[in-house]
Image (cartoon, grey):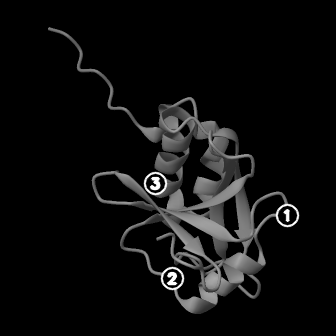
Amino acid sequence: MHDAPACLQAETHEAYQDVQPLCDKYVSQASALFQTYVDLKYAARWRELDARAIERPGGRADAAAFGAAGWAVIVGQAPSSKEKQVVLPMAIEQAMDSAMLSDLFAQLPSDAVHTHVLLAMMSNDATVVYYRLSQGMVKPIN
């Protein structure tokens, strides 16, 4: 009889140490944060990935709701880009309102673009889809 293989868990993955402190701090984002980080690092081949906290002005440090105290974001560079971008991991069922978006854009890191944020929306099957969210009015491409 053979022992059953251990289940793969985020905590055992080599990349988990890069996001673990923020997973502990922003529990509502933990799954999306880890899954997005792994996707960007291994599948999309982003460079200079850095998981960071963006504190929300006036946010409650003890609040567990998504965005109440701030957000865990990933800052990095896509292979086809010369600029760093901010990626906000979130579960598809989590919601943001206009006040949260204003607070997020006001606190973007100085070393990343300020014109947009990539929302990394994770579905229940762990698929991550990216949406570019721009600040203000943006002319359509076509």
Mark 1 Cα shell of 10 Å, populated few (<14), some (14-19), many (≥20): few
Residue that lies at the very extreme toward the right in this rendered image: 110
Q: With 57 as the anchor, is 88 left or right in this view?
A: left
- The circle on residue 31 is 3
The N terminus lies in which quarter of the figure? top left
Which amino acid type is shown beneath numbered disc 2?
Answer: Met
In the image, residue 79 sits, relative to residue 4, either above or below, namely below
Task: Determine contact: label 2, label 3, CB under 8 Å.
Answer: no
Q: Quadrant of residue 24?
A: bottom right
Mark 2 Cα shell of 10 Å, populated few (<14), some (14-19), many (≥20): few
Residue that lies at the very extreme toward the top in this rendered image: 1
Mark 3 element type: helix
Mark 1 element type: loop
Q: Position of residue 112 (x, y in %)?
A: 77, 59
Mark 2 element type: loop
Distance between the alpha carbons at the discs numbered 3 and 1: 26 Å
Which residue, given by chain and number where applicable, does mark 2 sit on? 96
